[in-house]
Amino acid sequence: MLRAAVCAGVRGVFRVQRRGYSGGQQVDAPRQTALYDFHRHHGGKMVEFAGWSLPVQYKDSHIVSHLHTRQHCSLFDVSHMLQTRVHGKERIPFMESLVVGDIAELKENQGTLTLYTNESGGIIDDLIVNNTSEGHLYVVSNAGCAEKDSAHMKNRLLEFRAAGRDVDLENVDFALLALQGPSTAQVLQAGLTDDLSKLTFMKGVTTGVFGIPGCRVTRCGYTGEDGVEISVPGDRAVELAEKLLQSPEVKLAGLAARDSLRLEAGLCLYGNDIDDTTTPVEASLVWTLGKRRRAAMDFPGASVIVPQIKGKVNRKRVGLTSTGPPVRQHTSILNAEGRVIGEVTSGCPSPSLKLNVAMGYVEPEYAKAGTALRLEVRKKLVDGVTSKMPFVPTKYYNVK
């Protein structure tokens, strides 16, 4: 029952891969990562996601992959993500002209989650910016926003260059592998000369991994577990994946497990939970705003966003739990009197908790954790309650 419910939700997010002609016009085939043939060889069920052909799951069910990640570790292909290097003496002012975070405060090899915002305060995308020790910023943003993000950065680049400012962009054509789960350090340390225990959450290093030089290892991920993302030259990606799979702790996992894991961790999916009509305050992402940046009000949309912090918004992102039939995106949220007060943006049965978890937006007076609500599922009302997120405690590696 749980597996069927999850798979139904997956079909709503990912499309089975099709190619050929539609309405007399040729349909472009989705792009393939360096691991495409590797996925097919290992039984990956390929679907189209953000213009890429990626495995939604392998021979193991989605539930098995999800729980294996929580208990051991799993390997995900996230090569569809946009990787960019920002060079030049004014790379930090350039990046801060686009995002809400305090990039200048980042130490060498430290990263942060931040947001591109527009002048109306809406979120263009969420991204990670790393200040490397090699004299550039390493930026990773979402595949679904790749063209938009790239154009946004290039437009600002033209402005900076026209003003005679020193900055340049470089597309990083590397594969990106995510190893996620409590066994990550045990598995990866065997292939590193660097001491992984010194690499805390959101720190990164350029190093050799299982004999492959020039990899960028960042301790981060999208599951709530300890983990790393490894940027590796495309022609060595299969080699690295095969070496990681030699450990009995490691299994392959696909998009379905990635989606349910991130939802249990309370992490947003761009296009579902946040978009260019959502402000960081509405999205409960105020923590991404650098304190210095708030005071200076020098990021795009600051005149809209900053007053919202101590003022009022019309909606707030909240966590939701329920029993019975699972809730999905666009499910209506109602108060006790039956009035619609919001809408679900993501939802699925939680393999870890054995109940339904979701996130969505409600009117602010209903955002307090523990508030009883009703959810309209298949034209029937089911009981729900607002919940703090993450639903499953995160286990990021930090040394105090």
Image (cartoon, rainbow, N blue to C red):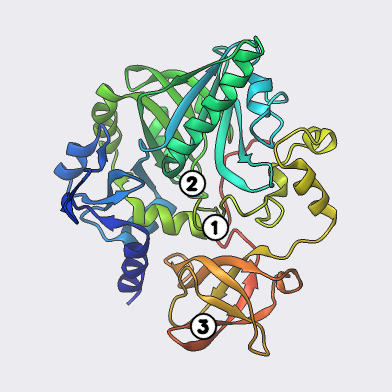
Residue 75: name its quadrant: top left
Q: In the rendered structure, which disc, 2 or 3, sits on the residue that comes first in sequence?
A: 2
Residue type, label 2 = Tyr
Disc assigned to residue 273 = 1
Residue 318: name its quadrant: bottom right
Disc assigned to residue 222 = 2
Vertical order, 305 against 313 (above or below): above
The residue that appears at 20% across and 55% down in the rendered structure is 59
Residue type, label 1 = Asp
Disc assigned to residue 59 = none
C-alpha span from label 1 to label 2: 15 Å
Q: In the rendered structure, which disc, 3 or 1, sits on the residue that comes first in sequence?
A: 1
The residue that appears at 35% across and 43% down in the rendered structure is 76
Q: Callout 1: 10 Å neighbours few (<14), some, many (20+)?
A: some
The residue that appears at 56% across and 35% down in the rendered structure is 128
Vertical order, 312 against 48 (above or below): below
* Residue placed under numbered mark 3 in the picture: 376
Residue type, label 3 = Glu
User: In the image, which is nearer the foreground, mark 1 or mark 2?
Assistant: 1
Pick the residue in front: 228 or 21. Answer: 21
Residue 171, x across and y down, in percent:
42, 22
Residue 39, x across and y down, in percent:
21, 42
C-alpha span from label 2 to label 3: 29 Å
